[in-house]
Amino acid sequence: MREITRFPYNIDGLSYDQKVILWNKSLSDNPTQGTTTNEVLYWDDTSKKWTPSATRFPATGANYTDIEADGTLEFNGNATVWKDMVFPMAPPKITGAGNPTLVSWNGNIRGYSFAVNDVHDFDPQEFSHDGKQASTATFHIHWISRTNVAAARTVKWEIEYTQANYSAVFPAASTANIEVTVPSGTTALTHYITDITTFTTANIASQMYVRLKRIASSGTEPADDPVVIGVHYHYEIDTIGSRGILTK
C-alpha cells in the first residue's frame, strides 16, 4: 500500500471530503471507487458502508491473509506466525533418587537442578485452538548453565512424549535426545535454548504428555548441575482461534 488519500463523495445528500480510502500502489491517484479489484476498501453507496474489494490480501500468490465469509481471519503460507506451547517446571517431588533438586542458583532465586538420571514429568498441555493442525513443531529446552569453567563441559537431555486427539488412543511415546557442549569460559548462569526434535502436531484439543530426563553425556559433566526452566515447543498459528469448540 502506498498512501492514504482523501477524496470527496456524497452520502444521503451530504458532501464529505475527509473520508479515507486505501488502495494498491499500482492504481492511479484518482481511482473510481468500487470499480477496481486492487482497492482494499471502497464506499458502497447502496449499502452505505465501507466494503472490502477482496477477501484475501494480497490477491494472488500462496502467501496471504484471508477473511472468510463468516469473518474468520486465516493466515496462509508465509503469513502464518509462531507461538510457544509451555510445559513449565511446576513443583516436582524434590526428595529421593531421580528427582530434581530445588536450589538457590542466583541469590535468593531458586529453581530445579537436574543431576544425571534426574527425571521430571510435566503436566499435559492441550494443543491451542490457534494452532495449525498437522504442521511441524519444534521441542526445545530452556535451561541454565551454572558453571564458569576453564574447559568445555557437556550436558545431555532426553525427552519422551506422546499426544492424542480427543476420542483417540495415545500411541507409544517417542524419544529424542540432544547433547550440548558448554564452551570453555562460558559465563556462569548463561541461559540456553536447545532444540531437541520436531514432530507433527495433532488437532486442536489434543493433549501432549512430556517427560524430561538428564542422561550421561559423552564428555565431562559440569560440576554444578544445570537448572531447567521448562520444556516448550514452537508451533505455527494460522487462525486467531477455532471456528468451533472442538473443530478448527
Image: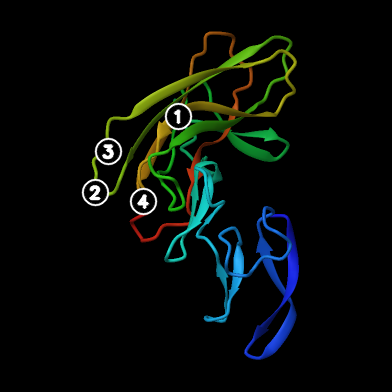
- Badge 1, how many Cα within 10 Å: few under 14, some, many 20+? some
Amino acid type at mark 4 = Ala
Give x and y (percent) for residue 35: 57, 66
Q: Name the mark nearer the viewer: 1 or 3.
A: 1
Marks 1 and 4, the one that precedes in the sequence: 1
Q: Is residue 28 visible?
A: yes
- Foreground: disc 1 or disc 2: 1
The x and y percentages for residue 111 are: 60, 37
Q: Are marks 3 and 4 in contact (CB under 8 Å)?
A: no
C-alpha span from label 1 to label 3: 18 Å
Above/below status of 54 relative to 94: below
For residue 5, which quarter of the picture?
A: bottom right
Task: Classify residue 126 as left or right of residue 237.
Answer: left
Q: Report how far apart the C-alphas of labels 1 and 4 lie in the structure.
A: 20 Å
Above or below, 167 relative to 49: above
Q: Is residue 46 left or right of residue 144?
A: left
Residue 170 is tagged as 3
Q: For numbered disc 1, what is the local secondary structure?
A: strand
Residue receiving disc 4: 205
Kindly identify which residue carries mark 1. 198
Callout 3 crowding tier (Cα within 10 Å): few <14, some 14–19, many ≥20: some
Q: First in sequence, mark 3 or 4: give its number.
A: 3
Circle 2 sits on which residue?
167
| Mark pair 4, 2: CA separation | 10 Å
